[in-house]
Image (cartoon, grey):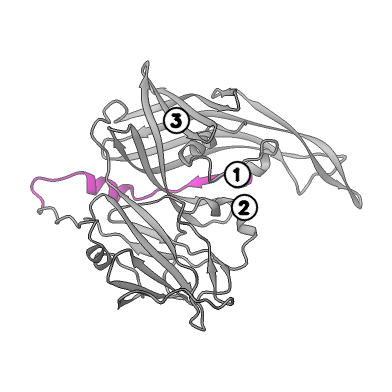
Amino acid sequence: MSQTYLKHLAYILLNGDIWQYSKNNLEEKNMRKISYLMILLAACVFMACGDDDGPAAEEKIDIDDPDVVSEMITIDNAIRNEGNPPAPSTDPNAPAIEDQSGDEFGAVSGNSFYLDPNVNQGTAAGIYFQVKGSTEYFDIPLGTSNTGGRFGNRKSQSRLFRNARTAESDIIEIEIPKNLEPGEFCAVYCVYDEEGLVSNAVEICIEIIEFGGEGSEFFSPQTWELVSSTDIEGGQTEIEIPGETYEETYETSLPCGDTFQTVEVTTAYRTNYMYLTFSDNGAYELKSEEYEKYLDWENSTCQDVQYTEETKIYTETGVWTYDEATKTLTVVTEYVDDYDGETYTDIFKVQLELVDDQLIITSEEDDEIFKITLKKKV
């Protein structure tokens, strides 16, 4: 499998779920490429850096106390009700939402978390949301100001999957208190329609992270430069090097008068550089310059195949935490999808190790292993 190095790293971080790669179709990969916006960096710095002369730190909120967590989170225009939300309806006309319980979600204390219920059947007039174990729940009418980002959902990154939806999604912003301690809390949500019919309920768990981590001195603070990316699958190993151009040739159908004809297309890509910076205040930045040559579908015919060539710089920022015991790096990032222009938030987990002064980032998915090798930038 061949792809650009930034995609390699992102693919590693997302364990292969966000991008549904086609091995023989580079422009499909290009259409799914995401670019990243600045996230929470100022908040990260302020929260991570203390001042001895400043006010005393706020008391930490116990993440294992669902009633306290529910009391402290904020959802604009939501109505708090005692007890549990109504049970799902048995009526076949009730709305249905996508089951996202198998996905991983994360947030940073003091910032927002976005919920996208992904309605697959019927319509939604509102959302019921409850911190699992709490004695209260939120009733969130839709059509209010609860917008601004999309709930991190790896499946929803698939362009084909999005096109298959039968209803639009509504996005809810949930504000996480800044003094919520690191850990995990779970929540249950469902939607209801204008008739009061209630959808299936979905349970998710949200990991709240703190910045940095003990034992991280071997990689932070430091800027690392890409050396190579390695893809091992089915006994085959493919290695890509920055600065080298890689081509992919495949067949596709292009218009030829009133019909279509199969033609051979050759696309190309190259990563000129990629830098990954870890700061000791828990912030990170990934920057990459990439060249791509891909098929110009709109202006191509079977007799005249046209290509578009471009070089772009991609920047991703986020916050990180490191678990020394498991050698696991966790990153929370926010980004805007080039395809739909919506904001997504995701959490990534990878393995880190230092081998001969090179930083190795590894992820395994089924029988496939992805590795990014970096060296210290001088």
Q: Residue at x 26, y 39 (%)?
A: 281
Q: Quadrant of residue 162?
A: bottom right
Q: Please say if the residues under marks 1 and 2 sit with CB atoms less than 8 Å apart.
A: yes
Q: Which residue is mark 2?
A: 159
The disc labelled 2 sits on which kind of residue? Arg
Residue 31 highlighted magenta (yes or no): yes
Residue 186, percent from left and from top: 34, 58
Whole-Å distance between the Cαs marked 2 and 3? 26 Å
Q: Secondary structure at mark 3?
A: strand
Which residue is located at x 82 percent, y 44 percent? 253
- What crowding class fits label 3: few (fewer than 14 Cα within 10 Å), some (14-19), or many (20 or more)? many
Task: Using the image, determine if residue 290 lies above or below residue 111.
Answer: above
| Secondary structure at numbered mark 2 | helix
Q: Is residue 129 left or right of residue 288?
A: left
| Residue 224 vertical position relative to residue 293 in the rendered view, above or below | above
Q: Nearer the viewer, residue 102 or 216?
A: 102
262 or 339, which lies in front? Answer: 262
Q: Which residue is mark 3?
A: 362
The residue range painted magenta reads 30-54
Q: Disc 3 residue type?
A: Thr
Residue beneath label 1, please? 20
Give the x, y percent position of residue 331: 37, 42
Quarter of the image where one finds residue 146:
bottom left
